[in-house]
Amino acid sequence: MVDLIARTSSALKAGIAVTALALTASSASAGGFAPHEQSSVFLGSAFAGSAAGGALSSMFWNPAALGQFDGINSDSTYSLVMPDTEITATGGPLFGSGTSRSSGDIGDTAILPASYFSYQLNDQIVLGMGVNAPFGLTTDGDFGWDGSMLARESKITTYNFTPTIAYRVAPGVIVGAGVQIEYIDAQLRQAAGAALGPTAAVKGDDVGFGFTAGILLSPGNGTSIGLGFRSMIEHDLEGTFHISGVPPQNQISANIELPEIVTLSLRQEITPAWTLLGTVEWTNWSRLPQLQIVCDAAGPPACGGAGVPLTTLPLGWDDGWFFSAGLEHAYSEQLTLRGGVAYEISPIDSDEGRTIRVPDADRIWLSAGASYKYSETTTVDLSYAHVFIDDARTVQGGGALVGDVESSADIISVGVRSKLDWMFAGSN
């Protein structure tokens, strides 16, 4: 047991365990670990036009889009994200240490929900609420593969509630703002001491706050330009580190700043039946130079004292960029078709920054979708996207593991948009 604890402590301090608390779930469908799938409508256009209105879910990217909607409305989306990510060890001291060179498919399938609500208070003010999961997914590699001392399982969950207000300043001008209230919960697991050793686990959670702001301009008939901002959210996570079968556990903490996001979008009517869509998005991932977990007090199995780093992972990520273009076609009064293509520049441009928990790389999106107006009060949305991700290389733990990464993702999304005024028609 003493030998196990000593080897585990050494691995931690070498930076090849429990790295990147709370923010390291592999997101094959997103640059970094912020999934885009917040709207079935905009998934169908590869998120082209996402901040320029047209659907209530546009308020995720631009709160001013809320001001387009009269009465009482809802918009709910459920996206099935099916990533396929495999890491194959090719070198380093950990090569050959496990039962398999391959991690297997680490990209667990997940359902990502999002919901939006609006209530028109008067001719100028519209109130709203967005409920999202803006960061994280899950990963789960083979138990004893060569990289299991770096990662066995990652699970990150966020719940973001955004009460929002939009104000119609003048014809063609809407501004909006909201408050973000975000809960984050993280669990990371990896082998301790050896590839087939017991599991070491980090757990932590926190509530953080931020804001959103935006403007929506309609300078002429058929033209809509939206600019939206989601602020940085700081999380001070508190949690524990423990090894299965070893009774003591350490109290740990970590300070994380999730990046701000700026989205600029256009909707431009070409003909009464065709609309051109476009988006440029910037994410400030460069505010994460490193991720560090520190001990709250001294004690076994791995903490030397209060404030002593349990592990530090230098990232050196760049900013992320997302460019998309699409078309929307009003095929009939009931049916609208859309499609789009996007190119996403990953914030990770080095082998060392590409962790086996976030093996991210540049990607191309191809999307298609449709909306069917079932009745005057209900519209159903259906979308599909395939994400082509560049093959990449990872070098982790100071060269402890070198590997090749192959990734792709398929996403199916269904949504329902409803006008709810009828529910309250008899209340007066």
Image (cartoon, rainbow, N blue to C red):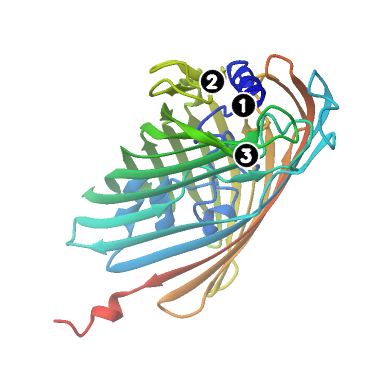
Q: Quadrant of the N terminus?
A: top right
Would you say residue 181 is visible in this rendering?
A: yes
Mark 1 crowd level (few <14, some 14–19, many ≥20, 10 Å Cα): many
Between residue 165 and residue 325, name the one nearer to us. Answer: 165
Q: Is residue 126 left or right of residue 384?
A: left
In percent of the image, x 49 and y 58: which residue is there? Answer: 113
- Tell me the amino acid under the disc marked 2: Thr
**Farthest front residue in view:** 1
In percent of the image, x 44 and y 15: which residue is there? Answer: 308
For the residue labelled by badge 3, is the local secondary structure a helix, a strand or a loop?
loop
For residue 246, which quarter of the picture? top right
Query: Residue 145 placed where, x, y %?
Result: 78, 36
Nearer-N-terminus badge (3/2):
3
Q: Is residue 239 left or right of residue 421?
A: right
Residue under pointer 3: 26
Residue under pointer 1: 17
Would you say residue 55 is visible in this rendering?
A: no
In percent of the image, x 45 and y 23: which residue is there? Answer: 299
Nearer-N-terminus badge (3/1):
1
Mark 3 crowd level (few <14, some 14–19, many ≥20, 10 Å Cα): many
In percent of the image, x 40 and y 58: which residue is there? Answer: 56
Q: Quadrant of the C terminus?
A: bottom left
Q: Is residue 212 left or right of residue 268?
A: left
Between residue 209 and residue 41, name the one nearer to us. Answer: 209
Query: Residue 383 placed where, x, y %?
Result: 61, 60
Residue under pointer 2: 311
- Tell me the amino acid under the disc marked 1: Ala
